Structure formats: structure tokens, C-alpha cells
Image: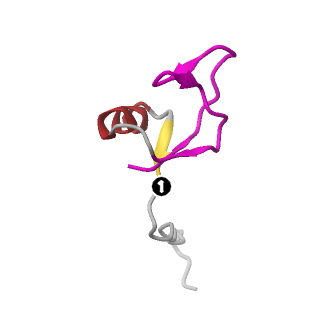
Amino acid sequence: MKIRILVSQPPGAVLHGRPWPTAGSEIDDLPTTVAAHLVASGVAEEVTDAPPARRRKSRKEGDDG
């Protein structure tokens, strides 16, 4: 599982035996359980090959176009 780190940590923090990566760094060599935990915790996001989903514009009531 490839992830992108979203949260910086203080100096000296480690991730799986290595210094904590900077926010925005992508990592693909962590065990799946570790990567999934970081994603579930909100510390990282999963990186997929698919393009990001496009957000739909919300229509306000009474907006006909």
C-alpha cells in the first residue's frame, strides 16, 4: 500500500524504525497493516494510480442554472 504522509512529527520521531518523513512524502515499503493504521488515524492518505475523484458542484435551492 502506497501512502502519503499528511502530518509532520517533532524531531526525533520515528516511523517503523526510520526517521519520520516530512509531510507530503510518499512511502510504499511499509507493511500493509502499518500503512492502513496510519491512514485510519488520519496521519496519512492512500495513494492510488487512479485520478482523484472530481467534486460535483452543489446546487443551491432556487438555482436553475
Residue 30 position in % (x across, y down)? 41, 38
Q: Amino acid at mark 1?
A: Val
Q: Is residue 9 magenta?
A: yes
The colour scheme used here is secondary structure
| Residue at position x 54%, y 71% in the image | 57
| Left/right of residue 39 with respect to residue 58 in the rendered view | left
Residue 34 position in % (x across, y down)? 36, 32
Q: In which image quadrant can residue 40 be found?
A: top left
Q: Quadrant of the C terminus?
A: bottom right
Query: Relative to 52, is 43 above or below?
Result: above
Circle 1 sits on which residue?
47
Residue closest to the eye, 29 or 54: 29
Residue 43 position in % (x across, y down)? 50, 33
Residue closest to the eye, 61 or 41: 41
The range drawn in magenta is 1-28
| Residue at position x 59%, y 17% in the image | 13
Query: Relative to 52, is 45 above or below?
Result: above
Residue closest to the eye, 52 or 20: 20
